[in-house]
Image: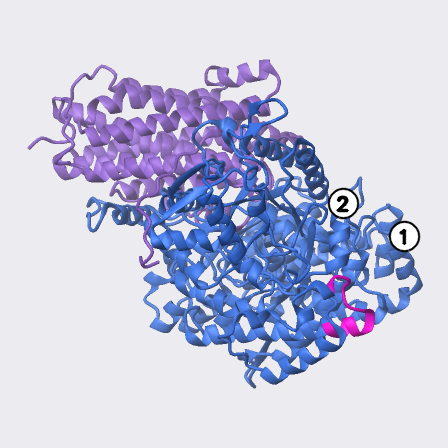
Chain colours: A blue, B purple
Amino acid sequence: MTASSTLAPPAADELRDLLHRHHRDLPDTDPGRVLALVESGRTARADAAELTELAISAAAGLIAEEPAYAKLAARLLAARLADETAGQGILRFSDSVAAAYAEGLLDPDFAGFVATHADALDGLVDHAADDAFEYFGLRTVADRYLLRQPTTRAVLERPQHFWLRVATGLSDTVAEAGALYRLMSRLAYLPSSPTLFNAGARHQQLSSCFLVDSPRDELDSIYERYTQIARLSKFAGGIGVSWSRVRSRGSLIRGTNGRSNGIVPWLRTLDASVAAVNQGGRRKGAACVYLDTWHADIEEFLELKDNTGDEARRTHNLNLANWVPDEFMRRVEADAQWSLFDPKEVPELVDLWGDEFDAAYRAAEAAGKAVRTVPARTLYGRMMRTLAQTGNGWMTFKDAANRTCNQVGNGGGVVHHSNLCTEILEVTSDDETAVCTLGSINLAAHLTRNVDGVPDGVDFATLGSTVRLAVGALDRAIDRNWFPTEEAATAHRRWRPLGLGVMGLADVFAALRLPFDSPEALALSTRIAEEIALAGYDASADLAAAKGAHPAYPLTRAAGGVLHPDHWPDARPARPDAWAAVREKIARHGLRNSLLVAIAPTATIASIAGCAECVEPLVSNLFKRETLSGEFLQVNRHLVADLKRLGRWDAATREAIKRADGSVRDLDLPAELTALHRTAWELPQRALIDLAAARAPYVDQSQSLNLFQANPTIGRLSSMYAYAWRAGLKTTYYLRSRPATRITQTTVRRGPLLTPPVEEGPPINNLIALGASDAADAVACSLENPEICEACQ
Amino acid sequence: MTTLLDPGMDLTLRPMRYPEFYERFRAAIRNTWTVEEVDLASDVPDLAKLSPGERHLVHRLVAFFATGDSIVANNLVLNLYQHVNAPEARLYLSRQLFEEAVHVQFYLTLLDTYLPDHEERAKAFAAVEHIPSIRDKAEFCFRWIDSIGSLDRLETRADRRAFLLNLICFAACVEGLFFYGAFAYVYWLRSRGLLPGLATGTNWVFRDESMHMEFAFSVVDTVRAEEPSLFDAELAAQVRTMLDEAVAAELAFARDLCGDGLPGMNTADMRRYLEYVADARLARLGLPPAYGSANPFPFMELQDVQELTNFFERRVSAYQVAVEGTVALDEAF
């Protein structure tokens, strides 16, 4: 009896026919296997809808064995979405917009524009472009991004309608919409999630990042910040906020003649407020608190996320970052003392950087204003411990940030902190909340191919035109943006900063056979960054010519002729002539945008595009993606292609990869493949820092740079972060480490273990050996940045 | 030379006879987690979305969890700690006892959250007496707890074999099969995006249980190396029978949970899964497989690999608690 014959017709027949149709151009899929899984998982009363859902998840479950099932599952899902919309009479793009507008989901002007240009816009839609999606990407779009009828939850648009809605929402003309739509539908450029959620919607809050200045050292200001942060969080923004102006523990409160409890109780309130804003919403609020390293509450600050100790002094919902001055790092190097201050006594320190900060800091020390003094290395060691234990307490460098920021010109502006993902560096003040709208270019979609279709380089010409389209769309977003607070609106219109980033760098390296730590990879990555900056500046200068420079342009360094790469005198641009031309254009017209490039984490949009996250190596060759509809296994498709060529893609190989926790080290592959497919845990971290430092001249904001240490020690971390500082990085992001113990793998066979493990080397290594043989696990790399994923992409 | 099961109260840590046990103790400490870190808030709206069949499954599961870890903790105190005569092993067992207590607290918190009605809560704890499928599993455990309850000292070969059977029962059948069965239901729900809080806590429980099981097997390995003659055909046959009984009990539980089947989860698949897991336990003990089933649940593969992205809050438990070393500026990294 075959599996399909026991399914109840006619739904089963239809499903079987459908699977066989797809099998024709996806020959590596096996309709029989999918049908057998459907048969075994179905209930007796299964209807067509249940069978389709089971077939989709059956195909999704086979992706780890054969990546072709990702296409099959995506097609089954796309067909289901087409049925669901057609069932409501939604066939064309304009139907979908009309239906969503009737449900009150869209902006009237937007709906009017679409109605006026219905035929032209409808003609742009190309449903065949659905085939660009892998399953995970389409599932994410279907679950979270497609507009739904508010009560029945039926989808009101197909994936291509969604792309065109976003493109149209960011455009003034049909031509602009068409160009942007084509870019997005081939997954070559994607705006960040808030833009994808809200373009064309009633509240067009399109921005990802908000940077709120530290509250002033007074009660009313602190409570005003809670309100501001709550409003910003409500509309899906991620918050970076400093707390450095608020007095430290023990400081005298003149009004009551009492003593302050310091910043921790205030941050507890912020923690509760951030958590409360989530409730009932689409996601949790997310905030990162920055503290200057000289603040006298720094040690308690570093313990805020510990999972032991007094819960009354813990903030589990907040992220933490250190805003570190060079003077501190110099004293760490010199093994000198470090003085901690109460900002009430030295309010000037918060607004100073560079030489002026150093002088004021030393003067305060000389004046005996320090609350206490500690060995700089002791405090640095505590920072490293927090990183190792929580992944949090990100190291961001105040002087590098200010020394190179275009907004820090002659207007007295100061960068006081970064954002939730450490890629945005913009000036803030009491009445200016910095804002950034993000989008990322999928580098994997910008490869050139030789006559055999094998990738042989980066398509710089197309990359340049993608940058121009992206800059145009990001700039238009500023004018359409709806701002939750006045402070945000004020700042954004003055500075018009953009955050154009990238994703899929690891795919480019894999396609071109370049290990992450090769000199060729470094050169290519730097060249890509240069091209993006060059095209970005050029596009922004053109926009300035057409629409005027941004209002605060005279205050910027660019107005004085200094562009971001000039802060790296050692950098050797590949295209000096093009830079000269851009400089001339900027001198003539100014810039429409004070900042252009920021490399954000891209977690969610990279999964929609089916590429590797931002500039990061893969954490594993076999990994899990989570969506609201569940979890899916994915395999590094470049590795699968290599293994198939070698005839090694089989169950034994898959198990060996799983057993080695996603590494290919035990496969006995040719050395160049083993080197090419090393995971983030296996790469020398120095290479990641060097890549970031080399592209830094062309990234005028910053980069969300994660670093990886499977088994961190204070010694290794302190060396690593000191190196990052010396390399001139402005910011770093999470420290990723792995749990000390693992779940025993259920689906990996191991032989009888009659001999007890041999002890060799220091105990800590022995332990890893145990863990590895006992099996790797699921929790290994619990990326802790879910909310960020959404806000910051 | 003394062996691990020689009666007594060895207090000597230097020189250390079984450094591996000590390393397991240290590794466990580095992975401390607390119940407060698990966010159960998003589970409550999910519960309302479940079909009646799924809700029945979740309630039964919670009822099993309510008492499961307490039973393990009791056996640990009453039987294991007394007889494993090495201070480093007892360090690990002390740590395990703490972890079992955290699990009990987690499932208590879960139950309080999932079952707002006080009578329902009381019923969940009484399930061990009233719900046949849960009672049978508990009785299986009690039988093996009682089997060595009267042994004060492991003097004879028969005593030691009785002890080994108890140890293997709790490692291979209770933690290694009953709990693995329960985890499969949780991961099935999670694979459909449901009950993320339950999944997070269970993930951490699962991680701990994996280590407990590995510790127990490593005790078995040690005893086998020290007293190979204890491991004969008779012991192998007894283990086989014990696993058969455990699979049968867990299958009855599956029948109760799944009824006529739910989309993606049914008794037939569960049977294959349990047999697959049971074979893995036999293999770990150096015994031939008894069932030859393949794993039917693709979602169980998901827990064997790294996560890339998630939308649920993950907390510090993915990280290490104790970090060593001092500041240096020139170490390799």
Q: Quadrant of the C terminus of chain B?
A: bottom left
Q: Nearer the viewer, residue A177 or A388?
A: A388
Q: Which residue has dot 1 on it? A: A108
Q: Using the rendered image of the protein, determine whether residue A166 is visible from the camera's viewpoint.
A: no
- Is there CB contact under 8 Å for labels 1 and 2? no
Front residue of A192/A301: it is: A301
| Residue shown at the point (62%, 69%) measured from the top left | A24
Side (left or right) of B131 relative to B19: right
**In the foreground, A121 or A680:** A680
Q: Is residue A678 above or below residue A85?
A: below
Rendered residue at 54%/14% (across/down): B122
Residue at 51 percent across and 26 percent down: it is: A312
The answer to whether A691 is drawn above or below residue B214 in the figure is: below
What's the residue type where badge 2 is placed?
Answer: Thr
Region rendered in magenta: A541-553
Looking at the picture, do discs 1 and 2 lie on one chain? Answer: yes
Residue ID for mark 2: A485
One can see residue A386 in this view: yes
Question: How far across and how far down the image is residue A110, in percent?
Answer: 87, 57
Q: Residues within 10 Å of mark 1 (few under 14, many from 20)?
A: some
Please state which of residues A14 and A793 is positioned toward the viewer in this rendering: A793
A644 up-or-down from A141: above or below? below
Q: How many marks?
A: 2
The stretch drawn in magenta includes residue A552: yes
